[in-house]
Amino acid sequence: MTKTKICITTLEYPPDVGGVGESVNRIAKILTNNGYEVHVAVFRSKHRLVSDGSRRRASCQTSLQDDIFVHRIKGAIRTNLTELTDYLSDVYFQLKLLHEKYHYDLFHAFFIIETGYVTTLLAKEYDLPVINSVRGADLHKHIFNPKNHGQISWVLENSDWITFVSRTLQKRAALITPSSKSKSSAFWNSIAPINFEELPKPANFQELSGLVIGTTGRFRDKKGIEYLIDACSKFSKEINFTLLLIGDFVDKEKSYWEQELKNNDLGSRLQVTGIKTREETLAYLPHLDIFTIPSLTDGCPNALLEAMSAGCTIVGSNVDAIGEIIEDGVSGLLVNPGNTPELAAALRYLADKPELRKQLGAAAKIKVQTQLTPAMELDNWLSIYQRILDDSNILQIRQLKVV
């Protein structure tokens, strides 16, 4: 039997570091294990700018990773600064060549800007179904650029189905394009079981003083780290603690964060580990007293699910899937985003309550093990894929009858 061929498009894929890449990898494996032939086309947008004077033609390199075809597309570099339109035109052409070679049955794009637009345009030109998955920043951040509004609206309008990782994102899409409401679904990411006992204890962890408050990620504007720093400053004279930032700040915001760190009064209480591998990051989690996720917006962050899997005590912002997954006072504590006093009060409240922290962490672990499993996510994706493919087949049959 011929396998159904799915082409997933994304801006990142392992070994690239990033939550979207991890999600695409997880979903691609789920689909492969259930009989689909999966191709992942990775758009290498970060190569648009060069400073070393190098030049190259557009290309596509294909490899097989875990029975998944991975196609890494690069746009041409003809000048020191490549225009976005030139880059997208190159990507479109390379994606078209892939389709003409493999004959895909369905396209699935992650992230509306760039990825979703090119993918949807190609799919519609070949009368093929297309799914777009909204992860967060596309509707939380990029929608505020007037130049993006028309593109986002067009992609939402022309998608056969749209998925969201939170109901907040689904609601915003319906405000922009009302028709999206009837052809969309919102469901959380999942996470595979993690054996934390197999991970080595982080070096020098014993040197951290007092209560260890931690968070993980690639820290940038939406993560709310400045509010976390301010909150910890409010009780720095009352409680012995260490604020541990496991990860590092994104390059384009480095100067801002250097200023923020310089201006805070936490001194040696604040520790930044620098970039870590996923395994190194996970190894820290069981040793944290409190895990914070003070995001201003955040889709459905993998960092939250990883911390829940480790049985961490969660203090998070009541935004997107964080506020949907964490039940305040049961599986963690929720505070309003950007509210330093609330965040400080929650951390201070938990500081001297080890039994409550243990109770909240245990509840979070049970929830992630029962409600955010790969099996549940698999059911969601298979249902959507089958529905879209069945609808597409029915439409093709009707078109043949008309002819």
Image (tube, rainbow, N blue to C red):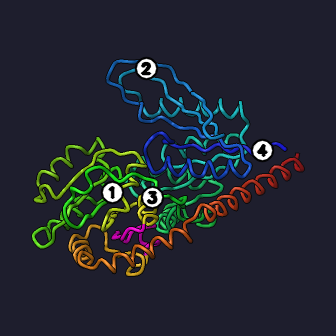
Identify the amino acid type marked 2: Arg
Name the residue located 31 percent from the left edge and 73 percent from the top edge: 336
Q: Is residue 347 above or below residue 73?
A: below
Frontmost of labels 4 and 2 is: 4
Identify the amino acid type marked 1: Lys
Q: Secondary structure at mark 1?
A: helix
Identify the amino acid type marked 3: Glu
Frontmost of labels 3 and 4 is: 3
The circle on residue 197 is 3
Along the viewing direction, whichever of 125 and 34 lies nearer the viewer: 34
**Occupied quadrant, residue 80:** top left
Frontmost of labels 2 and 3 is: 3
Residue 337, position as x, y percentages in the image: 31, 68
Residue 331 horizontal side relative to residue 242, left or right: right
Frontmost of labels 1 and 4 is: 4
Q: Secondary structure at mark 4?
A: loop
Residue 155 horizontal side relative to residue 84, left or right: right
Identify the amino acid type marked 4: Lys
- Mark 2 highlights which residue? 78
